[in-house]
Amino acid sequence: MSKNLVIATCIAAGILIWLLSGILTDDSGTAEHDSLALESAQSVPVGQTDLPRVRAVVLRSESRTRYLVLRGKTESKRAVDVKAEISGKIVSRPMERGMRVEQGELLCEVAVDDREVAVAEAKASLEEARIEYEGSLKLKEQGLQSETAIARSAARLESVRAQVHRQTLNLERTQIVAPFGGVVEQLHMNVGDFAVPGAVCATLIDLDPMLILAHVTESEVENMALGDQVVGRISNGRDIAGVVTFVGRQSDPVTRTYPVEITVDNADFSVRSGLTVNVRIGLGEVDAHQISPALFALDDAGEIGVRTLGKNNVVEFHKVRIIEDGPGGVWVTGLPDTTRLITVGQEFVSAGQQVEAVYPNDPSAQVAQP
């Protein structure tokens, strides 16, 4: 046999031996792995099941006041542009912007000019017409005066009376006064300006009571009523209280919400108009549970809810409604009075699935519920 053939035979024999040694080693490893798996299976505690394990807590409902939370703004009860009714030069304006005035206080004064003289002249004409009319009546008693002349005297008397009233009003209109108590927000005339009928002297706003205007959705409007107590917080941090005095019956065509008006006492005028306010309206007592918002889930229809445990630890999905948010979690309605809420593992189970539950806060509840 040649030398090359001997070398090739030796190499082939070596390769064959190496391959056989690998197969034998793999069988040994598999046998060892199977032995460990069997040992591990035999070490599982007796009574452990293959059901998914979740952690749950037992919650019991508490009575809570349900609040409707709205966002609105303060608004003055009324704002009026106080205008001149006659022509003339402004000779006095005692008020300044921001001043508080009472009803009837002077805002602007128009020059009297000859209006006092006109009143005196009209009163003299009135006296003349009265004497003339009374004389006509005496002549009638003597048969010396006709009915036509008497009627003419009476008509003149009434005409002069009207003239006296007209001239008196013109004199009074030189005083432009506040129609109600409030605050002077704007001044539109200065001393020396010439006023014409309809020219604005000042803008007056009424801040007591103050109004809060908000809008409520169509799903909540039926829960509101006149006289409902309201508490709120202004954007500057101040707390206020009031009552519902108006609930609209015509919705906004764009937002489909209804206007709500809340009246707040503001005798000291400390609440300004135009401030943002968050208000809470009490809608009665309800049974609610406090849970963490991290436990919320959505069902196939997109409804918000939580997963709980029912009979024989079967997972259930309950739709909930948030009624209040607080530092310890949110308060929700829609759960049974006593609820076994899944707190860990809820994202790995679904409604209708049976699980094994652990209750850190109530060991006695670990027994399957009937």
Image (cartoon, rainbow, N blue to C red):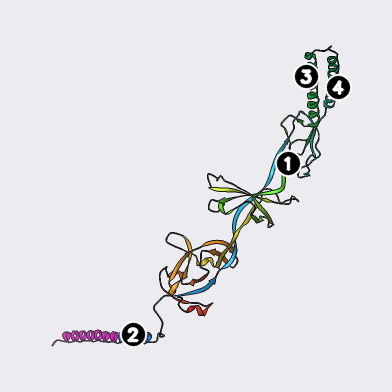
N-terminal of the pair, mark 3 or mark 1, is 3
N-terminal of the pair, mark 4 or mark 3, is 4
For badge 3, the amino acid type reads Ala
Measured from the top left, where is residue 188 in percent x and y?
A: 73, 37
The numbered mark at residue 204 is 1
Q: Which numbered mark, 4 or 1, is in the foreground of this view?
A: 4
Q: Which quadrant would residue 176 be assigned to in this image?
A: top right
**Crowd tier of the residue under label 4, counting other residues whose Cα lies within 10 Å: few below 14, some 14–19, many 20 or above:** some
Spatial CA span between label 4 and label 2: 132 Å
Query: Disc count in the image?
Result: 4
Spatial CA span between label 4 and label 3: 14 Å
The numbered mark at residue 33 is 2
N-terminal of the pair, mark 4 or mark 1, is 4
The numbered mark at residue 127 is 4
Residue positioned most to the top: 144
Residue found at x 40% / y 71%? 353
Spatial CA span between label 2 and label 1: 93 Å
Q: Is residue 12 left or right of residue 92?
A: left
